[in-house]
Structure formats: C-alpha cells, structure tokens
Image (spheres, rainbow, N blue to C red):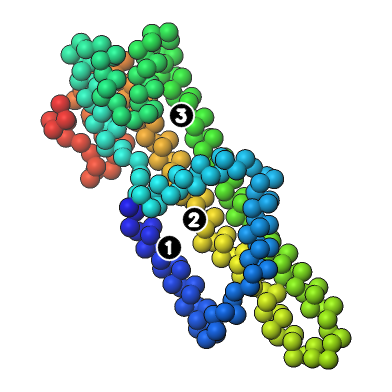
Amino acid sequence: MNIFSIIGFVIASIVLLVGLRLASDDLGLFFNIPSLFIVIGGTFASTSISFQLNRLFAFFKIFIDRVLLGKKTNYTRVVEQIIRIADASKKGQPIESQLSLANDVFLKESLDILNEGILDNENVVAVMKDRNENLLLNNMQEANKIKTVSKFPPAFGMIGTTIGMIVLLANLNGENAMQTIGPAMGICLITTLYGAVLANLLFIPIAENLVEDSKERYLKNKIVVKGLSLIIKNTNPVIVAEELNSFLPPKDRLDWKKVI
C-alpha cells in the first residue's frame, strides 16, 4: 500500500471537513441532493459523450493500483533481470531458454521478437524503441482525458448555481423573499463547491498520477531497449550492469557481483 498517498487523501479530507465545520456548526447545510445530482450526473453524462468509459475505467484501475496497492515501477528488478539474461546469453544459452527470466511484459515482448528471428538485430531494437515512444504517447493522451474530465464538475457546479439563481430570482415577489435570499443563495453555491471538490480532490490527482505512471513506464522501457541492444551485441554482463545502472539513482544501483 502506498501509505504516503493515503495520508495525503486523509489530510485533504480532514482539511475540507474542518473547514466546513469552522464555517458552520451545522454540516447539513453543505448537503444538497439536487446539487449532487447535477454535478455527478452531469459529469458522468459529459464523460460518456466525450470518451469511451471502458478506457477511463481502466485508467482508474491503474490509479487504484498505484495509490491503494502501491504498485510502482521497479527499475531495479528490471535491471536485475536484464543482467541475468545478458549473463546467460554471454554463456551461449539461446534466447528461448531465457524467456523465463523475464517477468516484465515489455522485456518479455522484446525477447520474443528477438527469438522469432524474423527481424534482424537492428530492426528489433528500432521496433521496440518505436513501441515505447508510441506507448508513452498513448498513455499521456489517456491521462489528458482524465484532465479533461476534471473540467466537467466545476462547469456543472456553475450550471447548478445558475439554475438555483433563476429559481431564486423567480420567487423574489413572495412575502418572505428577503428572509429567504440568504439560505437560497447558500444552496445555489453548494453546487459550485461540489464541482470544485470533485475536480481537485479526485480527477486532477488521478490525472497527475497517470502522468507520473506514464513517465515511469517510459523510463523502464528505455532501460529495456538499452539492455536489449547490449544483449544483441553479446556485451559482457558487467558492462551491461554499469550501463543500466546509469539510469538509476545511486541508492538503487545494483552490484553486479550479487546478481551474476
């Protein structure tokens, strides 16, 4: 579990609740079913029109995996796998026998293509490099879709506020109009509050997490492509280790003596 992200969400929720509590002793003032319906229902409707919901749900799953389950890219493990494969290759073992050493999907895919022998060595590296670039592009586009969705709740918050203002102004001729203006205005603004909270505590953090995840995957795949090119050249595994360690921060770098 990613404890730091969980703590961040808890702190954000506490700040919001304490802020509401300091503003009023009656938290019921901030609960309004029509406002919730307008903001949540409108956001869902606009999202359904704009994008394929199944793709968005898939990226919500990635976010949950990262935040709740703490599943982040393990560069060190990938580098370790590549070093072991390079060592086996240097000892003359065929690529086919090394597929079991690869747990990373992109690394296994690279070895599969190399093992098929349909493409020459240079083209294998070029193809995997292109795939990595295209994966980054696609993932960033999907993350930007979530950022687009984050614009919907504030917009529907304003729509709800406008609806409330229309109703309020239409009833100003009543006997107790002056006494009801304050409470009615409060209800009008609740939809704006809901929209801002939903955007800033849910959709924008999700989008930022997906952007970060896309960058991590891109760097991990760059390590794989570099390792693949070294394996193809039958490079000494010690050199492979030092080359790939260059991608890692000092604290995560591997000692090749403990791997080979």
Q: Nearer the viewer, residue 41 or 97?
A: 41
Residue pointed to by mark 2:
205
Residue under numbered circle 3: 132
Relative vertical location of residue 227 with respect to residue 17 in this rendering, above or below = above
Q: Quadrant of residue 31?
A: bottom right
Instruction: Judge from the rendering whether residue 135 lies leftward or rightward of residue 4; answer left or right.
Output: right
Q: Secondary structure at mark 1?
A: helix
Residue 212 position, x and y percent, is 44, 46
Q: Residues within 10 Å of mark 3 (few under 14, many from 20)?
A: many
- Secondary element under disc 3, as helix, strand or loop, is helix
Q: Which mark is residue 9?
A: 1
Q: Kindly indicate whether the residue at mark 2 contacts the one at mark 3 (C-beta within 8 angstroms).
A: no
Q: What amino acid is found at the position of numbered circle 1 in the picture?
A: Phe
State the separation of the CA atoms marked 3 and 1: 32 Å
Q: Nearer the viewer, mark 3 or mark 2?
A: 2
Q: Please report the residue visible at 54 percent of the width from the left and 80 percent of the height from the top.
A: 27
Residue 192 makes an appearance in the image: no
Q: Nearer the viewer, mark 3 or mark 1?
A: 1
Q: Which residue occupies 48% across, 26% down? A: 131
